[in-house]
Amino acid sequence: MDYLKIKGGQKLSGSISISGSKNAALPLIALSILSKKMVEILNLPDVVDIKTLIKLLSNLGANVDFKDPHSCFIDTNFINSTKATYDIVRKMRASILVLGPLLARFGHCEVSLPGGCAIGARPIDLHLSALEKMGADIKIKDGYVIASAKNGLVGANISFDKITVTGTENIIMAAALAKGKTTIINAAKEPEVVILCEILSKFGVKIEGIGTDELVIFGRDKELLEIDKIYVIPDRIEAGTYLCAGAITNSKITITKCEPKHLKAVIAKLEDMGFSFEIKGDKITILPAKQIKPIEIVTTEYPGFPTDMQAQFMAICCIASGVSVIDERLFENRFMHVSELLRMGADIKLNGHIATINGKNLEGTDVMATDLRASSALVLAALVANEVTKVHRIYHLDRGYENLEGKLSNLGAKIERLKEND
Ligand code: EPZ
């Protein structure tokens, strides 16, 4: 196992480019199941979660050929199994994204229940009840979802009790091959959902309401799509994380190959903390604050402040000049980074889903990553902590950040990746 050794106190400078979005690439890889043509996917991030989903598709029989770490060809005409097994699904909850497409194309599939994850129970009841409304027969047996729709799926009116990004994506893909019209009320509006809809539209699926919380999908009654090339959008959470690296070190840095319009809520909060920005095309430059001001944050669905940026902002709040309050509204256990930040001397009090943070200096020490975004928060804190911090169990980071230590080194951070017995 590896760990990151970080010497704090270093100002950053220069620019780094943002990789393709993990959370956009995952549904787009699943989408290849609906294509009768081989699909070329470009601008993939070189991260573990992508490799995990590709391995799942390969295990089903799909042919996957990587031209380079960031682009591959997927031919799903060779799929000869529709059973997504526990050994893969347990590694990544988003594997559930193959459920809708497999059921829509083959009329049956078995997908292991994902189980919870560090940040919460994360059930899939909304995915399953929606597919039942579309005519699927759903059973849970031995830890697997066993789904069948012998006569194909039928369009239905779906109203989600809670906004779920992967739930929306699963049903959009199922609806694309269903017979008739599907309406999704309370649909997620994240950019990752929008690009999925735009690509489906481009390749022959009529969809109304793209970008809104009410989608109408006109199914093709099992007629497969002819998808040839897909380009993955930039990763807004990776981009936000590097803006936070500039913020916490109060440095001027530039991120390139990003999509500023996906970062409005994040940029607004950083402006409230005293930072300013130069934004031009796909480039964002963050400029230092005279004083890093405390902030109040409530996480919510897009376009509001993203829960996936909560931990990173908490790291900045740990050194802000005053008391900040963070209210985590989406996940019941997304404060796993708090105990590790406390080890660094942070002053954080938790009351249910509300964290109160009093800014002060941080001390370098050994800390342990617990989930993807919590890990990035610990790296950010280490950039400003006194002395050296070692962040252990960074396999969590590798799931969603491409070459994080390389990109931070390019910005001037004193960071190195070592083996645990080094
Ligand atoms: C997506 O997860 C993202 N993952 C998450 O990013 C992100 O944190 C989340 O959306 C919220 O923005 C991907 O896109 C691959 P959910 P998603 O589990 O859609 C409840 C990261 O760091 N819910 O649907 O799977 C659930 O309990 C990851 O990159 C149900 O109750 O999120 C939660 O409260 C972490 N029943 C809320 O909805 C269901 O059937 C959203 O959670 C489904 C969800």
Image (cartoon, rainbow, N blue to C red):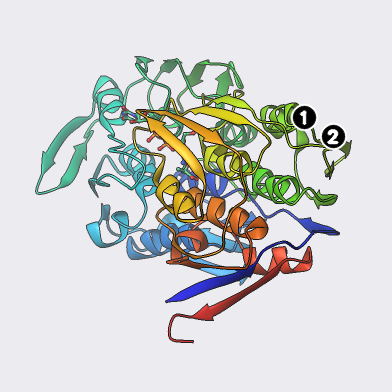
Indicate which disc, 1 or 2, sits on the residue closer to the N terminus.
Answer: 1
> Which residue appears at 80% of the width and 59% of the height?
12
Indicate the amino acid at tag 2: Ser
Read off the residue under disc 1: 271
> Which residue appears at 45% of the width and 49% of the height?
342
118 horizontally vs 31: left or right: left
Residue 403 in picture, x, y percent from top left: 63, 66
Read off the residue under disc 2: 276
Find out whether the residues at labels 1 and 2 contact each other: C-beta distance under 8 Å: yes
Q: What quarter of the picture does the N terminus occupy?
A: bottom left
> Which residue appears at 37% of the width and 18% of the height?
160
Quick check: 286 above or below 415?
Answer: above
Mark-to-mark CA distance, 1 and 2: 6 Å
Q: Residues within 10 Å of mark 1 (few under 14, many from 20)?
A: some
Residue 168 in picture, x, y percent from top left: 44, 28
Q: Give the image quarter of residue 146.
A: top left
